[in-house]
Amino acid sequence: MEKRFLTPAETAEAIIAAGRRVLEQSSGRTFLLSLLAGFYISFGAQLATVVTSDAAVHAGSGISRFLGGSVFSIGLMLVVVCGAELFTGNSLLAAAVLHGEISLAKMLENWLVVIVGNLLGALFFAWMMYETRLWEIGSVGEQVIRTAAAKCSLDPWVAFVRGILCNWLVCLAVFMATAARDIPGKMLACYVPIMMFVASGFEHSVANMYFIPEGLFLNAELHRPEPLLSWWNFAAANLLPVTLGNIVGGVLFVASAYWYVHLNRPIPKVTP
């Protein structure tokens, strides 16, 4: 009988094997896949906005956050099942670097292409959602503004720590999805950690590439401008510290930890 899942050690090996793709995959292919990941995470983010726009009024804030996290997880399911390059998940490439399968330069090159593609994909999706005018229905537009303003008002240290906790869970989701051998298993693996990080209030850099620009697009439109909502605060007060936190969470607590536990052994060095 075929195994339904991989052991943790086998999963770590599979993640390293998958990391070798950066040696052969063209930058154009990587960029297109990163655009798709930006779209997919934005799909989940906009659905979470719709669901939470009035859920707290009827069910309470805790249930509202649970529902928002539940539907947001669809974004990572699309990334994992359909295939895409997501910056936060690509923190796991650090395991391939530690194992000598790819160079540090190759990993950083991948990260740069992917984060730019994720950003452009999320920005384009935010613009498309603005053009749909669907934010005029009910209190969706107000929820967009509230979410974006709250994220831009975070202390950078708070944003950094929330970013660590977020990508710790995101990379665990990718780790478990790699272990699963069928689509239902991969979807469940994505669902639980992503629901946890969203309901908990942690910060995801790629999701914020949608949440905050969408709020910026609506800020003037709703004639209730939030002073904290600016492109500068988006970049400096949120995106930068959250991205750094995401890197620490994924690289240190998942990629490095599982490489050390399962695969730490002498290996030949790889030249850049």
Image: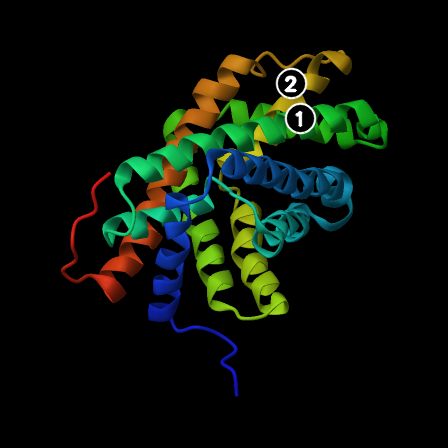
Rendering coords of residue 139 (x, y %): 79, 31
Would residue 161 be visible to someone looking at this image? Answer: no
**Along the line of sight, the residue nearer the viewer: 153 or 266:** 266
Q: Position of residue 227 (x, y in %)?
A: 59, 11
Is residue 224 among the parts visible in the rendering?
Answer: yes
Q: Residue furthest right?
A: 137
Q: Which mark is residue 156?
A: none
Q: CA distance from mark 1 to mark 2?
A: 13 Å
**Is 72 positioned to the left or the right of 8 in the image?**
right
Residue assigned mark 2: 216
Left or right, 269 with respect to 75, comes to left
Q: Quadrant of the C terminus?
A: top left
First along the sequence among labels 1 and 2:
1
Q: Image point 86% across, 31% down: which residue?
A: 137
Above or below residue 168? Residue 140 is above
Residue type at mark 1: give it. Phe
Residue at 53% across, 42% down: 201
Amino acid type, residue under disc 2 in the picture: Leu
Q: Residue 124: which numbered mark, if any?
A: 1
